[in-house]
Image: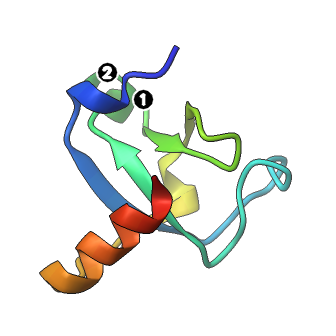
Amino acid sequence: MTIRGRLKTSLLVCVRNDGYSAALERRKIYRALSDPKAAKHDQVRVIDESGEDYLYPAAFFVPIDLPSTARRAVLAAAE
């Protein structure tokens, strides 16, 4: 079950995909949803290639901060 509409979205770049090559592409920007429980376990909730949100190791991603125009464009393209 996806929880996309209820949580704040942040952007992450995938830097590793060990064991998840079908679900994650290295160097691609992904939307991440706030999940405090996952963060306590060093995981992030990411909307992956399936279009659904799943937990992945936080070490697989680096957070990015884009100018507002670029952020809006990235988020619009992801919908």
Q: From the top left corner, tell me how far across and down residue 59 is, in percent.
A: 52, 57
Q: From the top left corner, tell me how far across and down residue 26 is, in percent.
A: 69, 72
Pick the front one: 17 or 25: 25
Using a 10 Å C-alpha cutoff, classify the residue at mark 2 as few (fewer than 14 neighbours), some (14 to 19) or many (20 or more): few
Residue lying at the far left in this picture: please name it.
68
Q: From the top left corner, tell me how far across and down residue 60 is, in percent.
A: 58, 59
- Element at badge 2? helix
The residue that mark 1 highlights is: 41
Task: Name the residue: 48% across, 59% down.
Answer: 78
Q: Quadrant of residue 5?
A: top left
Q: Are marks 1 and 2 in contact (CB under 8 Å)?
A: yes
Q: Is residue 42 left or right of residue 26?
A: left
Identify whether 70 is placed above or below 2.
below
The residues bearing labels 1 and 2 have C-alpha atoms spaced at a distance of 7 Å
Task: Name the residue: 39% across, 28% down.
Answer: 38
Identify whether 30 is placed above or below 20.
below
Q: Quadrant of residue 37?
A: top left
Which amino acid lies under the numbered mark 2 shown in the image of this protein? Lys
Task: Name the residue: 52% across, 43% down.
Answer: 47
The residue that mark 2 highlights is: 37
Which amino acid lies under the numbered mark 1 shown in the image of this protein? His
Q: From the top left corner, tell me how far across and down residue 32 is, in percent.
A: 39, 48
